[in-house]
């Protein structure tokens, strides 16, 4: 499974932090909505089409938070 995108609401702490991940695995698209950081609670959604997954992400990012897209970490060429 390949992580394609990651959004973060810009808040620290297990109560306030929220993350949304978009992942792809062959022809299936997966969206994870996580509240509470790494130790938090996640909800998972699966889609057959990329556009459906992006539509779900857009819906999850609605609200008062200032969402930021986090870029993938570059790999070490060595």
Image (spheres, grey):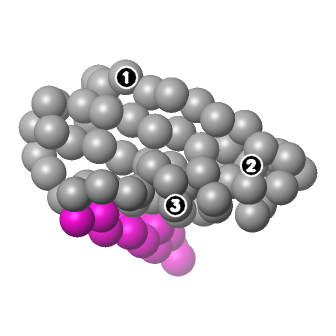
For the point 64% across and 35% down, the residue is 45
- Of badges 3 and 2, the one in the foreground is 3
Q: Report the front residue among 64 and 47.
A: 64
Callout 1: SS:
strand
Mark 3 and mark 1: Cα distance apart in space: 20 Å
Specify the label residue 41 is tagged with.
1
Decide if residue 9 is on the left or right side of residue 78: left
For the point 11% across and 46% down, the residue is 12
Tag 3 and tag 2, C-beta contact below 8 Å: no
Q: Report the front residue among 37 and 72.
A: 37
For the point 74% across and 49% down, the residue is 29
Decide if residue 77 is on the left or right side of residue 18: right
- Quadrant of residue 10 within the rendered picture: bottom left
Closer to the chain start, of discs 3 and 1, is 1
Q: Residue furthest bottom?
A: 77
For the point 50% across and 54% down, the residue is 59
Specify the label residue 58 is tagged with.
3
């Amino acid at each position: 499974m390949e992580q394609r995108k990651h959004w973060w609401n810009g808040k620290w702490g297990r109560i306030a932090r929220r993350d949304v991940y978009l992942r792809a695995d062959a022809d299936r698209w997966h969206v994870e909505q996580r509240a509470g950081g790494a130790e938090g609670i996640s909800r998972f959604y699966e889609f057959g089409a990329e556009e459906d997954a992006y539509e779900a992400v857009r819906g999850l990012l609605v609200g008062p938070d200032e969402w930021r897209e986090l870029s993938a970490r570059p790999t070490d060429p060595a």
